[in-house]
Amino acid sequence: MPFCCGGFLAILEYFKIYFWCLSMELLPFSVLLSVYFKESALYLDAAFESIWDNQSLKPDQIVLVKDGKLSSELDATISMWSEKLGPVLTVVELKENVGLATALNAGLDYCDYELVARMDTDDISLSERFYKQVSFMTHNRDVSVCGAIVEEWDERCLVRLSIRNLPSCHEGIMKFAKRRCPVSHPVVIFRKEAVISSGGYPVVYPEDYPLWIMMLSRGYKFYNVPEVLLRMRAGDEMLCRRGWGFFLGETKVFYLMWKLGFTGSFDFFCNVLTRGVVRLSPRFIKVLLYKFAR
């Protein structure tokens, strides 16, 4: 169960909005993805199935950024989906691998609609994801970023490992953001102009956390749908990625938070210390922390 100021009342309000939106004309939206050469063609195909074949509300546009040269298997999968989707799919080709932040900023320029849903090319969106998030954003024009609860699964999506619960309401998100990333990037939907006016994705890893901090500092309103709307492939590969380099990136984020006045000096040192323990621990300790401390 997600936690939030307001608790049950916040969830009740969400469902009231959801059923009210059944009779509304929903806003059009784009889906933004980026793929690079190390990714799996099978996972990419499954991701496309989840955002098109299996969705109750299909996107008006899908923007896929090819971040540098890809494998022949990935190119074949993209060609197959280009033929299937026709003008719905916009493929943006970058000559060199530039990293996720720069690739997403390039892709944003090609998104035709104000609402943009993020999706990673190895995750699975549940069938009602877009309907529920777009319904919420259509009704709540004051909200700029909307996330949801994510289930973390093993790499083959056979075993559920954990659930990442997050606060729903803006006040809870503001408080949570002082310690941890307050929305799950692969399941977020946002207003394009709000992201661009905040400077877009900063070229740092992780790229999403500092963007949310910049937006929260500028007064943009956030919300997390209190339901599971995405399955994320986690497992050993994700744990390996979140080591020394990830820790250095997070330290830069914590410094940004302190510099903006979002947190104080005590928060900064606590954040760096706790993150250092998590990111620099042996793998078996990381596994336990991710399992029991999410």
Image (tube, rainbow, N blue to C red):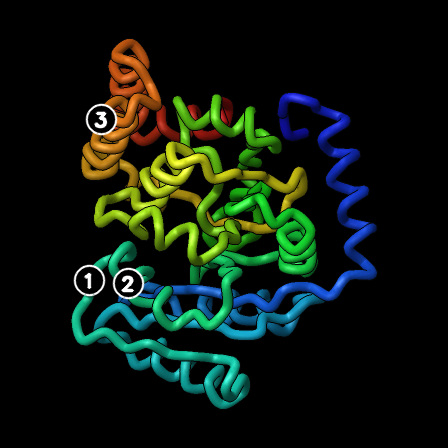
- Is residue 251 rendered to the left or right of residue 89? left
- Is residue 58 rendered to the left or right of residue 123? right
Q: In this view, does 230 lie above or below 173?
A: below
| Mark 1 or 3, nearer chain start | 1
Q: Mark 2 points at which residue?
A: 103
Quadrant of the rendered image containing residue 287: top left
From mark 2 to mark 3, how far is it between C-alphas? Answer: 24 Å
Identify which residue is drawn at 54% across, 35% down: 164
Identify which residue is drawn at 50% across, 86% down: 87
Query: Which amino acid does the dot numbered 3 rest on?
Result: Tyr
Nearest the viewer among 185 and 178 is 178
Discs 1/3, front: 3
Q: Which label was assigned to residue 240? A: none
Q: How crowded is mark 3: few (under 14 residues within 10 Å), some or many (20 or more)?
A: many
Q: Where is residue 128 in the image (x, y as percent from the top left)?
A: 69, 57
Q: Which label was assigned to residue 98? A: 1
Q: Is residue 12 above or below residue 105?
A: above
Query: Which amino acid does the dot numbered 1 rest on?
Result: Val
Furthest residue in direction top, as rendered: 266
Q: Position of residue 90 (x, y in %)?
A: 42, 79
Q: Residues within 10 Å of mark 2 (few under 14, many from 20)?
A: many
| Mark 2 or 1, nearer chain start | 1
Badge 2 vs badge 1, beta-carbon distance below 8 Å: yes
Quadrant of the rendered image containing residue 238: top left
Q: Mark 3 points at which residue?
A: 255
